[in-house]
Image (cartoon, helix red, strand yellow):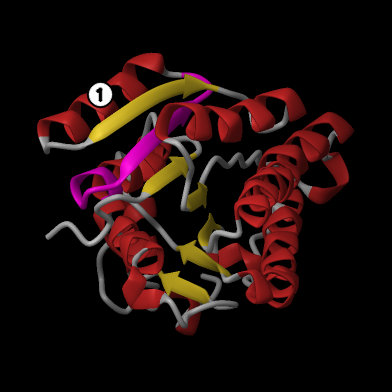
Amino acid sequence: MHRLQGKVAIVTGSGSGIGQGIAKRLGSEGAKVLINYRGSEAGADDTRRFIESHGGEGVVLKADVTKMDDIQNLVDTAWSRFGSADILVNNAGLEIRSDFWDTKVEDYDRQMAVNLRGPYFLAQAFVRRLRDAKKPGRIVNISSVHEDMAFPGFTAYCCSKGGLRMMMHNLTVELGPLGITINNIAPGAIVTPINKTLLEDKPKLDALLAKIPLGRLGTTDDVAGMVAYLASDEASYVTGATFLIDGGLMRDYHEQ
């Protein structure tokens, strides 16, 4: 199935984890993908090779979403390499654990810059191009269940994701007349390299699984499938929503 044939997608943080899964899925469904990374070029190259092996096309570009020049270059590169872009997936994210009373200003600023300011101004650069070309588009933000659910020890992270939810709500109204949809996906506990420590700690893992009604962790494919739907024509009337991909965690959460 190639429901994204002829589309062009920008996916931030697509050299590993959820972003890599998303880029691979969009590419395998026919989209040309601008694969963005900040850390692992090898991971981004792996994403590109996968897309190419499935008959798609991918271009790798290093960019830091906290830098305005890099943000503009990401959007400009999509247009220069592929002629335009239709889909923006704001996936790059950062979380730093600290008790509220110990949070450092630089850690707060860094999380806000990656998780909220980056998506804000990347969406702005993307929308400006679409508006000038009078083209519709799709924006999908990879948020978190913590845009709504408390997470002690991660207050700055939760603030950034709560801001991302409100940004999405506002832009639903502002961008609707331009034919641009915007939605959030809120993953719960997903198996990614960032969770390696948890996965190797059976007591902690078992305690978490006990809080998930479906009794398992999510996969990057679980998230990527929803992105592919929201990016497709099937979702042309879907905007302003947060989609939980959490196995029911939010509906049955309780502290131990």
Element type at mark 1: helix
132 and 224: which one is in front?
Answer: 132
Few, some or many residues within 10 Å of mark 1 (<14, 14–19, 20+): some
Looking at the image, is 245 positioned above or below residue 48? below
| Residue 82 image-quadrant placement | top left
Position of 16 relative to 217 (above/below): above
With respect to residue 31, does 44 lie above or below?
above
Residue 204 at x, y percent in the picture: 39, 52
Horizontal side, residue 115 vs residue 6: left or right: right
Q: Quadrant of the N terminus?
A: bottom left
Q: Residue at x 40, y 16 (%)?
A: 41
Q: Magenta span covers which residues? A: 26-39
> Hey, what amino acid is under mark 1?
Asp
Residue 87 covered by magenta stretch: no
Q: Which residue, given by chain and number where applicable, does mark 1 sit on?
A: 46
Position of 145 relative to 54 (above/below): below
